[in-house]
Amino acid sequence: MIHALPDEAVSAIYQAVGGHPLAIKWIAGLARTYPLPFVLASWQQQAGYRGQIDGMYHSLWQVLTPVEQLLLSIMPLFA
């Protein structure tokens, strides 16, 4: 996953997350679906690691259609 990204992208991810291994993998995975600048901007807008995780989920939630949001919100009821 991260091996498929250019060196500049990996460096930008590393700098943005402070080298946190799980965050690097997570952002690299998101960059396969969303533009890397969007993912990094969403990450950097939040304060603190917990805020960054919450903010990232919030930003990605806003990208979903209402039907996709509904589906994801009811999935735990059937799992």
Image (spheres, grey):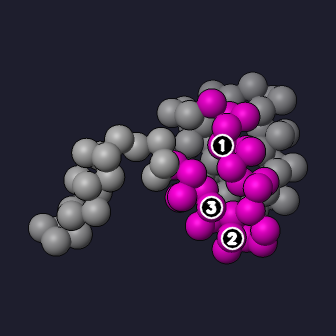
Can residue 22 be spotted in the picture?
A: no
- The x and y percentages for residue 38 are 67, 38
In depth, the one of 73 and 17 nearer the eye is 73
Which residue is at 68% across, 49% downward? 42
Can residue 11 be spotted in the picture?
A: yes
On whether residue 59 falls in the magenta region, the answer is yes
Which residue is at 32% across, 52% downward? 69
Inter-mark Cα distance, 3 to 2:
6 Å
Give the answer, above or below, for where 36 lies relative to 56: above
Give the answer, above or below, for where 38 lies relative to 43: above
Q: Which residue is mark 3?
A: 55
Asked which secondary structure carries label 3, the reply is helix
Label 3: few (<14), some or many (≥20) within 10 Å? some
> What residue type is disc 3 on?
Gly
Q: Which residue is mark 2?
A: 51
On whether residue 49 falls in the magenta region, the answer is yes
Magenta-tinted stretch: 35-60
The quarter of the displayed image where residue 54 is located: bottom right
Asked which secondary structure carries label 1, the reply is helix
Q: Which residue is mark 1?
A: 39
In depth, the one of 4 and 52 nearer the eye is 52
Inter-mark Cα distance, 1 to 2:
14 Å
Inter-mark Cα distance, 3 to 1:
11 Å
> What residue type is disc 1 on?
Val
Q: What is the chief secondary structure element of the magenta stretch?
A: helix
Task: Tell me if label 3 and label 2 are in contact, CB under 8 Å.
Answer: yes
Q: Nearer the viewer, mark 3 or mark 1?
A: 3
